[in-house]
């Protein structure tokens, strides 16, 4: 959804692009704590699946939804209410700051729905019902794209948008002619994403009533287990706090880039959008790895856990290697999907080629992070990634980009160091083998 938001507001100029990217990053920072809750649900559900304790899989879901409510509801309200107070710290531009406040204050209202969806993702992945994710993601993104086009450009402007950017799809503009949509720019993108997030939550919930889910895992018999929730919290806390700490680090990185220039900030946010989209297929491989590692540990089949890790790395390398090669060879084609600004295109080519060159390192670190999480070790990768984000990316970008004044390119040369160190440390930890003895 963030990819589509950035792609569709990109034609509104650098300020709109910077506002949407910064707003999405700050929203992700607030939501990232729920990644830990999702991991706790997935790890416990998959371990109980391996132990054939199916009712407890449903209990893990109920615990996760309870924790998501306790965290997500107040943060949604706080983000909506306080956006005008904390946004100016991160971005200081006459036009972009007001647009970021407008976008962020609305998008935070959808945080609770997104938090619930994360919990559902952890549960359905843990019990090996991953086709549900595909169906929910496709429908929710269709909702987002449809509303984006109408609300960003208006029912009049949407025809012009298609004719100028994708003439072959101009006929689709008739889908917005049944009523009048006002052109709201970045505000429209935020409203569309909130509505799509609500639909995602509802769609996930509907699958609880299917026969395969309802009877086998007793998901409609409300059960909250304090002892199990304590285990889930012990799994969730390190990873959730790590994700918040890391998201804060990347937000500071954005702030540092913004100190260099607005065009540099818009380019960086565009590159991050493309990079995040590129590892989504590998995310599926990592989630599968996490589930299988935990499930086989529950069955006391450690050799199969190890085999799952090796196969996952191989598959992730195929996926991200191909993506990386395409970034190196055809960077302008990707960039032009989002913007036609010549300065952003010029700077973006270097950054995207750098991202392409390190995709194979990212694949290794990515999969092994999930493998350790599935085994129940969420603390070690949390500490490592947090230290590298702040020590290499944040500190390094400030020193080289601001203090030494080396500019945009110097910041992106830090990424091979960051990803290389992370991948190397994760390989060492997996080979050490102490994860094999973790009990949940």
Image (spheres, rainbow, N blue to C red):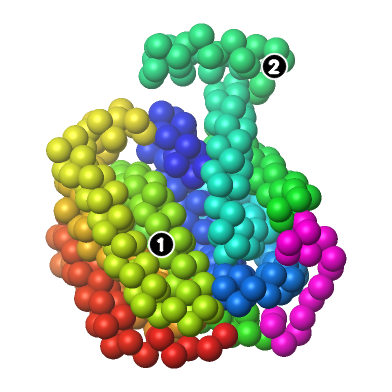
Query: Between residues 208 and 359, which one lies in front from this camera angle?
Result: 208
Query: Between residues 415 and 103, which one lies in front from this camera angle?
Result: 415
User: What x and y, as percent, mark residue 327?
Assistant: 21, 42
Residue 219 highlighted magenta (yes or no): yes
- Mark 2 vs 1, N-terminal side: 2
**Which residue carries the number 1 mark?**
286
**Which residue carries the number 2 mark?**
180
Taking 11 as reference, is 30 left or right? right
- Residue in the image at 29% along x and 49% along y: 319
User: What x and y, as percent, mark residue 436?
Assistant: 41, 86
User: What x and y, as percent, mark residue 326?
Assistant: 21, 40
Q: Evaluate whether residue 115 shows in this view.
A: no
Q: Evaluate whether residue 345 shows in this view.
A: yes
The quadrant where residue 165 appears: top left
Q: Secondary structure at mark 2?
A: loop
- Residue in the image at 29% along x and 67% along y: 310
> Which residues are the magenta region?
214-229
User: What x and y, as percent, mark residue 440?
Assistant: 57, 85
Could you tell me how far apart the alpha carbons at marks 2 and 1 are, in whole angstroms? 43 Å
Q: Check disc 1: other Cα within 10 Å, few if <14, some if 14-19, many if 20+.
A: many
Taking 113 as reference, is 240 left or right? left
């Amino acid at each position: 959804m963030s990819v589509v938001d950035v792609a569709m507001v990109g034609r509104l100029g650098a300020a709109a692009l910077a506002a949407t990217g910064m707003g999405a990053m700050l929203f992700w920072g607030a939501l990232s704590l729920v990644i830990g809750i999702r991991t706790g649900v997935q790890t416990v559900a998959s371990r109980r699946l391996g132990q054939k304790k199916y009712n407890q899989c449903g209990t893990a879901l109920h615990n996760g939804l309870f924790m998501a409510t306790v965290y997500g509801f107040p943060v949604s309200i706080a983000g909506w209410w306080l956006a005008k107070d904390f946004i100016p710290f991160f971005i200081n531009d006459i036009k972009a700051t007001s647009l970021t406040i407008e976008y962020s204050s609305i998008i935070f209202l959808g945080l609770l729905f997104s938090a619930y969806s994360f919990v559902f993702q952890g549960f359905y992945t843990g019990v090996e019902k991953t086709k549900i994710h595909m169906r929910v993601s496709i429908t929710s993104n269709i909702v987002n794209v449809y509303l984006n086009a109408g609300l960003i450009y208006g029912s009049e402007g949407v025809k012009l948008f298609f004719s100028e950017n994708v003439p072959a799809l101009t006929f689709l503009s008739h889908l917005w002619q049944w009523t009048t949509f006002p052109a709201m720019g970045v505000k429209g993108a935020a409203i569309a994403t909130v509505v799509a997030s609500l639909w995602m939550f509802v769609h996930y919930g509907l699958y609880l009533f299917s026969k395969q889910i309802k009877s086998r895992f007793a998901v409609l018999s409300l059960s909250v287990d304090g002892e199990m929730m304590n285990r889930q919290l012990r799994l969730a806390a390190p990873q959730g706090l790590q994700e918040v700490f890391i998201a804060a680090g990347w937000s500071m990185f954005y702030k540092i880039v913004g100190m260099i220039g607005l065009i540099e900030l818009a380019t960086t946010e565009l590159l991050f959008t493309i990079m995040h989209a590129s590892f989504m297929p590998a995310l599926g491989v990592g989630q599968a790895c996490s589930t299988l590692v935990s499930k086989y540990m529950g069955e006391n089949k450690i050799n199969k856990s190890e085999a799952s890790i090796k196969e996952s790395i191989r598959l992730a390398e195929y996926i991200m290697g191909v993506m990386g090669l395409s970034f190196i060879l055809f960077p302008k084609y990707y960039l032009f999907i989002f913007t036609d600004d010549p300065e952003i295109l010029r700077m973006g080519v270097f950054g995207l080629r750098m991202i392409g060159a390190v995709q194979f390192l990212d694949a290794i670190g990515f999969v092994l992070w999930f493998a350790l999480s599935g085994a129940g070790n969420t603390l070690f990768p949390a500490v490592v990634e947090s230290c590298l984000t702040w020590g290499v990316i944040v500190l390094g970008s400030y020193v080289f980009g601001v203090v030494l004044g080396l500019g945009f390119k110097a910041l992106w040369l830090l990424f091979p160091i960051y990803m290389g160190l992370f991948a190397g440390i994760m390989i060492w930890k997996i080979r050490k083998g102490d994860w094999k003895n973790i009990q949940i």
